[in-house]
């Protein structure tokens, strides 16, 4: 972040890099690892912005980069390391948290088709040699009111998981939950409210148009809720 508040943090990072270069220059070994003031320096990334600015996508890009670069570094160090497969699985599990969190915490709004309705603090733990060894995620400020009124605003949806379940769940699963696969059967996700700019009419053509519009409000362009449900289930099983 280009902000004076973080000037000291960036200065420490630059000093650490210079010390690494000096250490490597004198030792002649580029693989040596050193610490800054005998301590491991943690790095933080703050992603902020208005709705639709790309915070969710930026978070996924950064997490993917950290996981991929770690896996590439491991494969270059040793192709026969017995722990390489398990480490790769761990990193994939870290990435699999994104679809799961989006299913239960993201929804379609007037400004964003995949808006995060909560904040999250992601902490990824690395070993001294740069391997991902764990991850913890803290969530806060979930928009709980959307659960009961998220489908009542024209152009918005409730949380993705409701639509994924209704459109992607098997007949056996829906039957066990006493549900149907018709989104419009449920007020909290069916968006039954009429548009304020719509003229009320008793003609059958207008009624059909309104029903079609209500159905369209509960979908996202180029997104299959059924396929997303399978992805969400796979991620939950792997985690």
Image (spheres, helix red, strand yellow):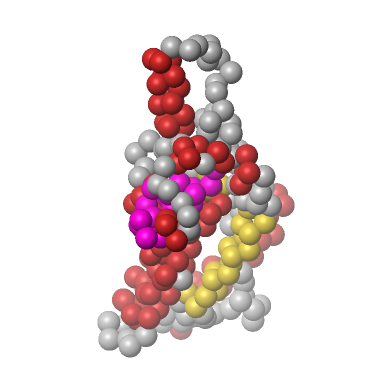
- Look at the image and tell me whether residue 108 can be seen: no
Is 81 situated above or below 95? below
**Observer-nearest of 179 and 62:** 179
**Observer-nearest of 80 and 94:** 94
Residue 97: x and y in percent read: 48, 63
Q: How many marks?
A: 0
Horizontal arrangement in the rendering, residue 169 relative to residue 138 (left or right)? left
Residue 77: x and y in percent read: 34, 80
Q: Quadrant of residue 19?
A: bottom right
Horizontal arrangement in the rendering, residue 39 relative to residue 175 (left or right)? right
Q: Which portion, as a residue range, is magenta?
A: 157-173
Horizontal arrangement in the rendering, residue 75 relative to residue 43 (left or right)? left
Q: Quadrant of residue 220?
A: top left
**Observer-nearest of 113 and 29:** 113
- Look at the image and tell me whether residue 32 can be seen: yes
Is 25 part of what is drawn in magenta? no
At horizontal 50% and vertical 11% (from top left) the residue drawn is 201
Q: Residue furthest right?
A: 5
Q: Residue furthest left?
A: 79
At horizontal 38% and vertical 55% (from top left) the residue drawn is 169
Secondary structure of the magenta portion, mostly? helix
At horizontal 63% and vertical 59% (from top left) the residue drawn is 139
Residue 221: x and y in percent read: 38, 36
**Observer-nearest of 237 and 178:** 178
Is 95 situated above or below 73? above
At horizontal 44% and vertical 19% (from top left) the residue drawn is 207
Residue 164: x and y in percent read: 43, 50
């Amino acid at each position: 972040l280009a902000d004076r508040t973080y000037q000291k943090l960036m200065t420490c990072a630059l000093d650490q890099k210079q010390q690494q270069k000096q250490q490597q220059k004198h030792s002649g070994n580029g693989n040596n690892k050193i610490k800054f003031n005998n301590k491991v320096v943690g790095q933080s990334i703050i992603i902020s912005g208005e709705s639709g600015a790309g915070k969710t996508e930026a978070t996924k890009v950064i997490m993917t980069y950290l996981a991929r670069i770690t896996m590439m570094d491991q494969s270059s160090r040793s192709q026969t390391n017995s722990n390489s497969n398990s480490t790769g699985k761990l990193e994939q599990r870290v990435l699999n948290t994104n679809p799961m969190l989006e299913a239960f915490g993201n929804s379609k709004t007037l400004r964003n088709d995949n808006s995060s309705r909560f904040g999250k603090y992601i902490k990824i733990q690395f070993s001294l040699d740069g391997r991902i060894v764990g991850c913890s995620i803290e969530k806060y400020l979930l928009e709980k009111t959307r659960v009961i009124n998220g489908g009542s605003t024209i152009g918005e949806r409730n949380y993705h998981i409701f639509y994924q379940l209704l459109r992607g769940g098997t007949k056996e699963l829906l039957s066990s939950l006493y549900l149907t696969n018709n989104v419009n059967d449920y007020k909290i996700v069916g968006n039954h409210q009429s548009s304020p700019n719509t003229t009320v009419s008793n003609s059958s053509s207008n009624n059909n148009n309104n029903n079609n519009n209500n159905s369209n409000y509960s979908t996202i362009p180029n997104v299959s809720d059924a396929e997303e449900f399978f992805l969400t289930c796979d991620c939950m099983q792997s985690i």
